[in-house]
Amino acid sequence: MTMGKFIRVQLFFPRVAWACILSMAALTMASAEPIADHKNRLFAYPRTLDVRDAGDYRVIDYREARDIDRRDEIPERRVKRAYVDFGARRATKKEGVDTPAGRLTYRYAGRLVGARYFTVYIHGSGGDSRQGVDDFTFGGNFNRIKALMMKSGGAYIAPDAGRFDGGDLERLRYLFVALSEASPNARIVVACGSSGAIVCYQLARDKSLMPRMAGFILLGSYSDASYMSSPAGRARVPLMIAHGGRDRVYPIAQLEQFYGSLRDAGIPARMVNFNSGTHGTPIRMIDWRETLNWLLTN
C-alpha cells in the first residue's frame, strides 16, 4: 500500500482494529533485531587515526585516491558494481501525497505500512529526491541504506524538500505525521545533508513527533545551538555528526564546538571527522548501519 492510499483508507479504519495492530506491533518491537548486515566490509570506515570520548569522537583516514578513484568506475559518477544491490535499485518507487500545503513528491524503498524503522534523507539546497536514491553516486551509499532498510523491515524515504520555505516545511511535517500513523511503532531517523539541516532543526522543535524520533544525522551540515533547548534536546534525542575535515562551506571547528555542547548538555552525541574530506564526503562515507544501530539503542 502506498502512503497516498493509506491516508485515504485510514480515516475509515475501525479503532478496534487499530488497537489490535498497535498491540501486535508492540510485541514485534520488543523482539526487534538491530539493523541487518549488508556489504559491511565494503562500506566499513577506513583506518581510525584518533579516538576520543570513549569512541564517540573519531578521526577517520579518508583519502580520495582510495575512497573515490579506486571505489568508483567513473570517479564521483558511477561506483563499481560490487557496491550496488540491484534488488534495492529495482525496489525504488516514486510516490506523492497530497497535504494541506500542496502535493509532496518522494521516492522510497521498503515498506511504508507496519514498518519497524524509517530513515528519511533530506537533500541540501538545489537538490531533490533523486539525489537521495541515486544508486551509483556517492560511492553507492544511498543504495546501501535502501538495502539496509528493506532487510530490516523498514523503509528509506527521500522527499523533495524544495527550498525549505514555510510551505515545504509544512508538507514535510505532514509526511512525518502520515508515516507515524502508517507505522505507529516505527522509530524514525532523519538524516540532513548540508543546508537541509534546517529541516532537522525544525523537526526537533516539534514536540508531537518526539515519541517517534530515534535520532538525527547531520551530513556536512551546520550547527544550531537551539537544539539543546528544543523538545528533541530535552528528550535527549541522539544526534550524529559526520563532517569533512576540509569542508569550506561549514568549517569543522563549528561542528566540533557543537558536538562538545551537546555532550555538556547530556544529549547523546557522536562525531566522525573524515580528516581530509570536503563538503560531500560524509554522504559518501558514513557507515549507515553502525550509525543507525547506535541511534536506535540510545
Image (spheres, rainbow, N blue to C red):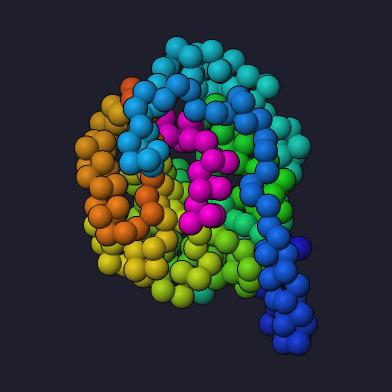
Q: Quadrant of residue 2?
A: bottom right
Residue 136 in view (yes/no): no
In magenta segment, residue 114: no
How far across and how far down the image is residue 297, in percent? 53, 55
In the displayed structure, would residue 293 be above or below residue 208? above
In magenta segment, residue 283: yes
At x 67%, y 38%, the residue is: 37
Span colored in magenta: 279-298
At x 70%, y 76%, the residue is: 22
Which residue is nearer to you in this view: 56 or 69? 56
At x 41%, y 25%, the residue is: 48
Would residue 223 appear left or right of 16 to someone viewing this image?
left
Residue 276 in view (yes/no): yes
In the displayed structure, would residue 235 be above or below residue 38? below
Which residue is nearer to you in this view: 167 or 196? 196
Q: Quadrant of residue 200?
A: bottom left
